[in-house]
Amino acid sequence: MGQKAHPIGNRLGIIRGWDSNWFGGNNYSDKLVEDEKIRKYLSARINKGGVSKVVIERTLKRITVTIHTARPGIVIGKGGSEVDKIKEELKKLTKKEVQINIFEIKRPELDAQLVAEGIAKQLEARISFRRAMKTTIASTMRMGAEGIKVMTSGRLGGAEMARTEQYKEGRIPLHTFRADIDYALAEALTTYGKIGVKVWICKGEVYGKRDLSPNIGGTSSASGKGGRPEGNAGYGDRGDRRDNRGGGDRGGDRRGGGNNRGGGANRGGGNSQNRGGGANRGGGR
């Protein structure tokens, strides 16, 4: 079996903060179970609200729940009515005072959880898995990600035998701790079984000390390099290649040069270097 570390757990305390911020004490296990209940409840309650993650912070008598969402309007509701309902329901669930904060995700294409859920919803709507994966990769790269990898597993396209397919673009350096890599897993419940979707998104590299408080460090775009690698390496190379192809080397020396192809006297004119030069070509003749 391959030993694989969770990309987010691997970076905790280095460039990532924790999603639950509290001191456990003697009843640590109760608080842990309660956190899981809150998260499960919220994901079911606001399943169309584009919830990326739920950050839970505790004081002695109060629980502060921060919901990171791409659609704050759906979570808040008209005049904040929906938030008040959720608050009351969480009070019943936890039997404690609950405060809810809502944090808007400005660029959902760079959030692994939202990207994975988007692909899962498309698979449930019977869209071809290849098309769903490729369009998602294109939109994420357009938003300035440094790299993305998408993997789907299960009975893809309704096939009899389950298999795994993956596509990737850019760079995803999983071994580099300073690389800000977001990872998420979502499941598509199709008529022929579950299809798992995994997404890795590299947002750049973090240099220097980063604030690990959950609502700052995790959502801000990586300080340091973001977007494409410096200098647009791919672009420059392509440009140089074009120069070499059409430049003097091929035109002059190889094709029309007197020394190579034309024998003793140049093919065109007396001093001709290029095959296509009007004055040169017609001169000698």
Image (tube, grey):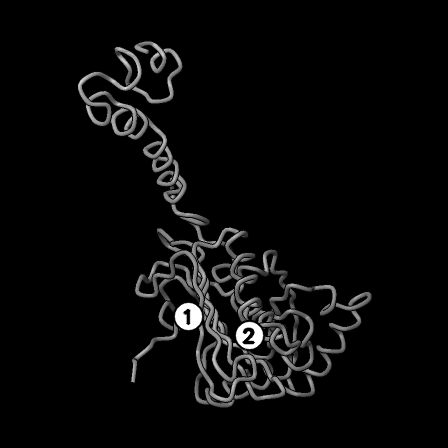
Secondary element type, mark 1 = loop
Q: Nearer the viewer, residue 246 or 161?
A: 246
Where is residue 26 drawn, in percent x and y?
A: 44, 89
Closer to the chain start, of discs 2 and 1, is 1
**Height in image: 108 above or below 239?**
below
Q: Which disc number belongs to residue 8?
A: 1
Give above or below for 50 relative to 105. below
Q: What kind of element bears circle 2?
A: strand
- Report the mark closest to the observer, 2 or 1: 1
Q: Residue at (25%, 26%) from the top-left corner?
A: 253
The disc label shown at residue 255, or none: none
| Crowding at mark 2 (Cα within 10 Å: few <14, some 14-19, many 20+) | many
Whole-angstrom CA distance, mark 2 to mark 1, is: 17 Å
The percent position of residue 3, horizontal first and vertical second, equals 30, 80
Residue farthest front in this picture:
285
Q: Which residue is labeled 2 in the image?
A: 56
Dot 2 and dot 1 residues touching (CB under 8 Å): no
* Front residue (pair 147, 156): 156
Disc 2 residue type (three-letter): Ile
Q: Residue at x 41, y 60 (%)?
A: 180
Residues 92 and 231: in front is 231
Asked if residue 237 is positioned above or below residue 282 in the image, the reply reads below
On screen, residue 249 versus residue 193, left or right, reads left
Graded by Cα atoms within 10 Å as few (under 14), some (14 to 19) or many (20 or more), the crowding at tag 1 reads some
The answer to whether residue 271 shows anywhere in this view is yes
**Residue 215 visible from this viewpoint:** no
Q: Residue at x 66, y 71 (%)?
A: 100
